[in-house]
Amino acid sequence: MRAVIDTGDPGLEEWKRLFGQLWRIRAFEGQVQTLAAAGEVPGFAHLSTGQEAVAVGVCAHLGREDALFTSHRGHGHVLAKGSDARAMLAEIIGRSTGLCQGHGGSMHLVDAPNGVLGATGVVGGNLPLAAGAAWAAQARGKAAISVVFFGDGATGAGIFHETVNLSVLWQLPVLFVCENNGYAEFTSREEHSTVGSVRAFADPYGMAAATVDGNDLPAVFEAAREATARVRSGAGPYLLECMTHRMAGHYVGDAQHYRSREELAAVTAKCPIERMKRRLLGLAVAREELDAIGEAAIREMAQAVADARAGAPADPRMALCHVYGAPALQANPGAGE
Amino acid sequence: MRAVIDTGDPGLEEWKRLFGQLWRIRAFEGQVQTLAAAGEVPGFAHLSTGQEAVAVGVCAHLGREDALFTSHRGHGHVLAKGSDARAMLAEIIGRSTGLCQGHGGSMHLVDAPNGVLGATGVVGGNLPLAAGAAWAAQARGKAAISVVFFGDGATGAGIFHETVNLSVLWQLPVLFVCENNGYAEFTSREEHSTVGSVRAFADPYGMAAATVDGNDLPAVFEAAREATARVRSGAGPYLLECMTHRMAGHYVGDAQHYRSREELAAVTAKCPIERMKRRLLGLAVAREELDAIGEAAIREMAQAVADARAGAPADPRMALCHVYGAPALQANPGAGE
Amino acid sequence: MSQTYIELLRRALDEELSLDPAVHLLGEDVAAGGAFGVTKGLAQKHGARRVRNTPISEAAIAGLATGAALCGLRPVLEIMFIDFATLALDCLVNQSAKYRYMSGGQLAVPMVVRTQAGAAGGAAAQHSQSLESWFIHVPGLVVVAPSSPVEAYGLLKRSIRLGDPVLFIEHKRLYALREELPANLPLPDIGRARVARAGCDVTVITYSAMVGSALEAADIVAGQGLSAEVIDLRTLTPLDMQTVAASVMKTHRVVIAHEAVRNGGVGAEIAARLAGELFDELDAPITRVGCRFAPIPFAPELERAVLPGTADIVRAVQAACA
Amino acid sequence: MSQTYIELLRRALDEELSLDPAVHLLGEDVAAGGAFGVTKGLAQKHGARRVRNTPISEAAIAGLATGAALCGLRPVLEIMFIDFATLALDCLVNQSAKYRYMSGGQLAVPMVVRTQAGAAGGAAAQHSQSLESWFIHVPGLVVVAPSSPVEAYGLLKRSIRLGDPVLFIEHKRLYALREELPANLPLPDIGRARVARAGCDVTVITYSAMVGSALEAADIVAGQGLSAEVIDLRTLTPLDMQTVAASVMKTHRVVIAHEAVRNGGVGAEIAARLAGELFDELDAPITRVGCRFAPIPFAPELERAVLPGTADIVRAVQAACA
Ligand SMILES: Cc1ncc(C[n+]2csc(CCOP(=O)(O)OP(=O)(O)O)c2C)c(N)n1
Ligand SMILES: Cc1ncc(C[n+]2csc(CCOP(=O)(O)OP(=O)(O)O)c2C)c(N)n1
Ligand SMILES: [Mg+2]
Ligand SMILES: [Mg+2]
């Protein structure tokens, strides 16, 4: 799709494109929210609204051959990596035209040709997989790197620490991107850990790390440029902590009783899209042009929903496919069926 | 048995007693080695030879009401806490007179009345149990603390990090004692982690921590005095890293091909007993007196083995006892027996 | 006044917290009510020290609960989805289940692990599993799987008081179910199954959410002249083979139904026991109803294609009585 | 020249490392040979980059292997004792087993998890378990449990080449067993059981170390005029019910033996299938032989009291043929 960018300021046109990417995610999640509220999304839908700048700023430095792993809150990352919004939405509403033919769903998006190797519903479960992908790249002499997005809550899981230790030890080309949004479900970071900044976990290992304002697209972009360049250079893993905020609830339907009005207002005031808009206005881009970018994204996603909805429902005859690959096993060895 | 000591130098008589404790562990492990080599110890026997000063220096500050948890290499800790050598040996050779009636064995010593709440064969598995015991003490308003011994290898396990996070968060009265002997089985610390000093893992959490020469009894004693006092005061958990050396193999029978002659000689030169002996000689204790202390320990353990051997073998009629406690379940609900 | 499965679970917890100061709740978000609201309000009532939020550390919190249980607490731990019990399994299997035994009876682990299983509405492969059969394979654990609000209430109270480690498996499809709690209801015994519906032609053995499907199926086949007895096992360890045997010696035909995949499921154990101990009483092949052998897929059409339901039980009953 | 089970496992690994550059070994101490010496010398021969020591991080190394398998490696992971597979279970069950399915067939996880199970000589409660039945309950996993050195060799090679995640369960009591590897032996198929001894009066279905006990038992009952056919299942998923059925249709009597506790064991599944699919072929109750329902105790007298052995199989065969 787009070339890997790895040095310096990408220029105004690229900033505008990235601004559009923010909007595409925002509009995508808006559609998911509407669909979920209407009962068209099976299961749990976790929105990345408010965290778009992390996805866009990091994925700007990735090519299709780089591996991306994400969590339950992964729509934005997958979209920013360049996957097709229609196929994503079709998966999220369970169509046979979805990325995974309806087998996966919102928390399990995979788009292998685009290097999206998977979202997972197990908090922290994606971390060692990403390190493993990095190991494979290292072992096979490939230039690709592996990037994994995860929440601050995942640092409470032992697997985070095991994976960091191994990645540093083996000098794996993996970039850990923590979206520190201060919450795990309904519980604030303060109740989860006395460690406010996740970056601190890198220190014992001497792992390269940085904390950045995750709502500031150029800041994320620049930090991710450095981080990916370093990881690509073979210098080992990197932890990039992006301080950000969930503008929506934990999942669609979460009434957020645990957050005050003031808190929610403060979060809204930090909207990464508004912030980037101000930045671009400051660079003398016309308000109309920026509005048009947003509107185009909104139109694109409305159309994507229409396209996704047009797809055939998942095919029940496929329900027992893909359990095994080996031909001898495809006859489904369980319970005689 | 003995009072909790919590301030200052314990005085020469106590140092001599503790010197005797070093010898008791050394002699105990010597007997286990002989028994294991003779095939009298079922399963795996892991000796703490060379690491005695950690057990003795820490346990000097514990009372019976304090909880102790240990690992596969736990004989020394249990002995230093004041458990009966005969009942321990009887368990280790599988007698009905053993601490656990032969159900547990070398890796699973429990002596509940003495606060020895268990050894575990799962690396790191004892850590959250110790935190849980500390939580119970906290919740029930007891003054007791919980102490857990573990190896440097256990810090590779996620459970270590999860437990530290929780313990700091809940300010639990638990003392983590890491015996950093530079090896996990046949693999050196360098191959396990780039983090040389385990103490570093405390930093992100702001947990109180110290590293001490684990072969220097007075140093361990003093560090443990501070650490236990702090934990007892309600100031939260503490990590005490004791740098030490395994003088024996990973288990009895390990040929240690992975260690050079020079390395083994260097380790022997650091023997904590010899070191304490020099210290006491310097304090004008007569060599004869010190020799007598060692000989008494050796005699005691020889007698303990004889006593243990005299115990009846484990009783096969007990094999299905203690699976459940609830009377309705004791009829053994599995498979109709 | 009827109450939901969730409300009656909450009531059981509330009462036990009030009765016994040793009872403590812990788990992810439990102070906020937990993902399904079961513990809502309990932190406010009993204090944040007795209803404690934890980090996302399933392994450590299981260990914490176990260690605390060794030292006089009666922890009730919530694992949000049974799928994540995988993360706590080392502790539950290697420590909690074995502690009493390994210590030669010196110590006990009076703790309850509340968790929630089953598929509903697209929760997909990692949030829908039914993994109870793993736990019946572990000596030392008790496994409870209540089928209704009233059952859940009584069995949870009994589990908390038991004194052995209990895996208490709720089902997400049952959470909204309503029932009235009868006054002065005696609490059910752990290890005692119940005849949920009497019948004489065939015995349907089941538990948890499938009890409802079995009762529906029994209604349907009744219209076809078949009288099905439905047994709600309630506890999977111990298995109440006496109640099962009494029924099978009457009907001589058996259908076993659960939501888990058949292969290696609890139904296999029951069928094996019958094929061993009551072989001569059986007049027909034992039929098992269970999930088809695949991970639980996301899309509703796929989910429906793998999950067992009332129609499968009806077919199995018909086959058993053919 | 005969070789041990360990030597033939090593030979299989050595050959596959030589044949396919994608094959990599990882695990605790594997570069030093592993706890039992299976991988001894392989790091020297194939390089420390292909035979890699890991920290004590069962969860992470299972994840690492899975992620690498998604990206073109064929990792062979060693989990030192199956008891510690508990720590890797989240990954194995929620990721490795389901990845192909959840991705709609886009990705695969060609990896082998070698581990070692069973009781021997006082390894006690946390180092002696037989937990294979958990894994047959997980769609997406293949489960292999070889019974002899030659079987181990062939099945390991096949497992590495398979393309699906395989749990490969060795048995500590078999490690020292010797056998000669026949020249030009065709590799066994995954999913094909083998008749280890032909007979006509009763079928003994078993796997792993209990195959040896079953053969001994068959010898003993032969002296009493009973002809026992012994089936070595080899793979527990898939289960080769064809081979089993062919035997049962000949003998009409069945004994199932494994070292795991019966409750919820693999034997339950086999018995259940027979009670469902071959009910009319059965002339006697199905007898299961397994460990008594307790954690594995430490002392030899206790260990012997719970473990199943040749004598139990003899008794079961006699009962089945009474
Ligand atoms: C192992 C595990 N435990 C619990 C859950 C339930 N759960 C889903 S999301 C979540 C919070 C995750 O917080 P964080 O990692 O900060 O990500 P965020 O939702 O904030 O993006 C929890 C506890 C889970 N999915 N997996
Ligand atoms: C979870 C787990 N993985 C692997 C093992 C096998 N094992 C036993 S001891 C040991 C090394 C432990 O090293 P360390 O924690 O440093 O303790 P040390 O033996 O040096 O005292 C290993 C890997 C185990 N017992 N538990
Ligand atoms: Mg978060
Ligand atoms: Mg060590």
Image: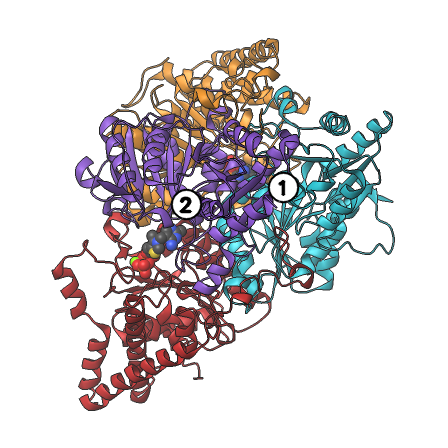
Chain colours: A red, B orange, C purple, D cyan
Quadrant holding the N terminus of chain C:
top left
Chain ID of residue with mark 2? C
The residue labelled by disc 2 is C212
Q: Is mark 1 within 8 Å of ligand 1?
A: no
**What element does badge 1 sit on?**
helix
Would you say residue A207 is visible in this rendering?
yes
Q: Amino acid at mark 1?
A: Ala
User: Which residue is nearer to you in this view: B331 or B279?
Assistant: B331
Chain ID of residue with mark 1? D
Q: CA distance from mark 2 to mark 1?
A: 24 Å
Tell me residue A311's x, y (percent): 44, 77
Q: Is mark 2 within 8 Å of ligand 1?
A: no
* Residue C85 position (above or below residue A201): above
Tell me residue C88's x, y (percent): 44, 42
Would you say residue B123 is visible in this rendering?
no
Tell me residue A136's x, y (percent): 56, 65
**What element does badge 2 sit on?**
helix
Residues at discs 2 and 1 both on one chain = no
Q: Quadrant of ligand 3?
A: bottom left
User: Which residue is nearer to you in this view: C242 or B77?
Assistant: C242
Looking at the image, do the residues carrying marks 2 and 1 touch, with CB atoms under 8 Å apart?
A: no
Residue C85, quarter of picture = top left
Residue C293, quarter of picture = bottom right
Direction from residue B57 to residue D118 in the image, left or right: right
Q: Residue at x 74, y 52 (%)?
A: D192
Q: Which mark is residue D272?
A: 1
Residue B311, quarter of picture = top right
Q: Amino acid at mark 2?
A: Gly
